[in-house]
């Protein structure tokens, strides 16, 4: 069972809107799925650097799901790998991050353990989470990994070196090291049991639930993808407006608009590679880019456009105006 409390209220509302509410913003748009049915797993592992600076009993840090990277509904952490002499291991998590909570055990939830893990001072050992942690884009979760093994050889961590570990989906922030083998204990023979500016050493393995393209998710996709969608719709609009009674071949204008929507829905978020040569969209009033049925009728001569093409053009017009109104 996933730890749903880590999806904050705003994220829960967004999830519910995407998955349950009807799409009223863009009329005549088919009921396209907005997210994948399964988690994308296997290749998403964020492994930190290892300078072998320190051993002790615990490490506390924030794990953030990055926003404005790839379009996903949430990331789900399923395994955390660490190394050291380990022992009786417990992993805690707290929504919103760890700051100010290192001495407040009631604000943390156990997501793994306690469980005995065999010593592995040189190789990372995966610890399966009993409750996978879901994090919405832009949100943080505090992670606290602790060993009850006495002494100072239980868990490896590093000194902070001024930059954070991250990949396209998650960012691992600098945190605190814990010197006591009693969870959340603040006292130690050396004074305070907490040491600032320490880094997690290990691997975070997670899956993501990808967003699929639909009008309601359009603005979550990269600029290159959004420009690709608009270019295709503009090409179809152009071919419909220049429709001739007899054509030598089938063009994009003959393809039903609903089919184009479905094609975009199947495409991956990186199907349109980024380029340094993209033009900038002009900052002009929205009304300058709106198309209306009257202009379409005037553009056709001798009423040669069929009723089917007019309906298709009207659908495309509504769709184009909706996409242009979304932020870039």
Image: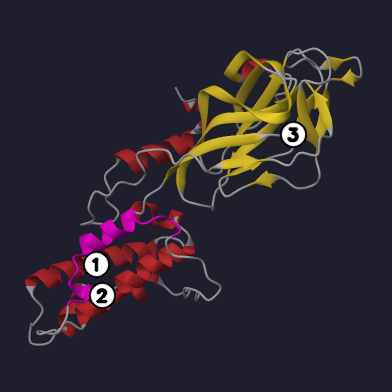
Picture layout, residue 115 above or below residue 5 = above
Query: Which mark is drawn over residue 175?
Result: 3
Q: Residue at x 32, y 70 (%)?
A: 232
Q: Which residues are magenta?
A: 250-270
Question: Mark 1 or 2 closer to N-term?
Answer: 2
Neighbour class for label 2 at 10 Å: few (<14), some, many (≥20)? Answer: many
- Please name the residue that numbered disc 2 is placed on: 237
Label 3–label 2 contact, CB within 8 A: no
Is 266 magenta? The answer is yes
* Residue 51 locus on image (x, y percent): 80, 39
- Could you tell me residue 177's position as x and y percent? 78, 27
Q: Quadrant of residue 237?
A: bottom left
Q: Choose between 220 and 272: the one closer to the eye.
A: 272
Q: Does residue 314 show up? A: yes
Residue 179 drawn at (x, y percent) = 82, 20
Q: CA distance from mark 1 to mark 2?
A: 7 Å
């Amino acid at each position: 069972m996933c730890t749903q409390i880590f999806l904050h209220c705003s994220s829960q509302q967004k999830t519910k809107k995407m998955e349950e509410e009807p799409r009223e913003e863009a009329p005549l748009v088919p009921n396209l799925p907005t997210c994948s049915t399964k988690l994308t797993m296997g290749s998403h592992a964020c492994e930190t650097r290892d300078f072998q600076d320190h051993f002790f009993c615990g490490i506390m840090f924030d794990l953030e799901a990055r926003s404005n990277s790839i379009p996903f509904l949430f990331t789900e952490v399923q395994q955390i790998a660490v190394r050291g002499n380990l022992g009786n291991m417990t992993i805690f998590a707290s929504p919103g991050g760890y700051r100010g909570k290192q001495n407040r055990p009631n604000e943390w939830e156990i997501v793994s353990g306690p469980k005995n893990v065999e010593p592995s001072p040189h190789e990372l050992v995966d610890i399966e989470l009993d409750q996978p942690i879901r994090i919405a884009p832009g949100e943080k979760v505090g992670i606290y990994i602790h060993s009850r093994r006495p002494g100072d050889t239980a868990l490896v961590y590093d000194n902070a070196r001024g930059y954070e570990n991250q990949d396209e989906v998650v960012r691992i922030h600098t945190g605190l090291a814990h010197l006591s083998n009693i969870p959340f204990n603040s006292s130690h023979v050396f004074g305070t049991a907490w040491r600032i500016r320490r880094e997690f050493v290990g691997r975070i393995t997670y899956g993501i639930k990808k967003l699929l393209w639909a009008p309601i998710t359009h603005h979550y996709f990269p600029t290159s993808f959004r420009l690709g969608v608009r270019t295709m719709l503009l090409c179809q609009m152009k071919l419909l407006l220049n429709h001739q009674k007899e054509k030598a071949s089938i063009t994009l204008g003959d393809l039903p608009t609903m089919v184009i929507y479905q094609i975009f829905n199947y495409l991956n978020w990186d199907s349109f590679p980024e380029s340094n040569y993209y033009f900038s969209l002009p900052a002009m009033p929205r009304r300058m880019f709106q198309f209306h049925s009257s202009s379409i009728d005037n553009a056709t001569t001798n009423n040669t456009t069929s009723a089917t093409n007019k309906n298709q053009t009207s659908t495309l017009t509504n769709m184009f105006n909706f996409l242009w109104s979304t932020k870039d």
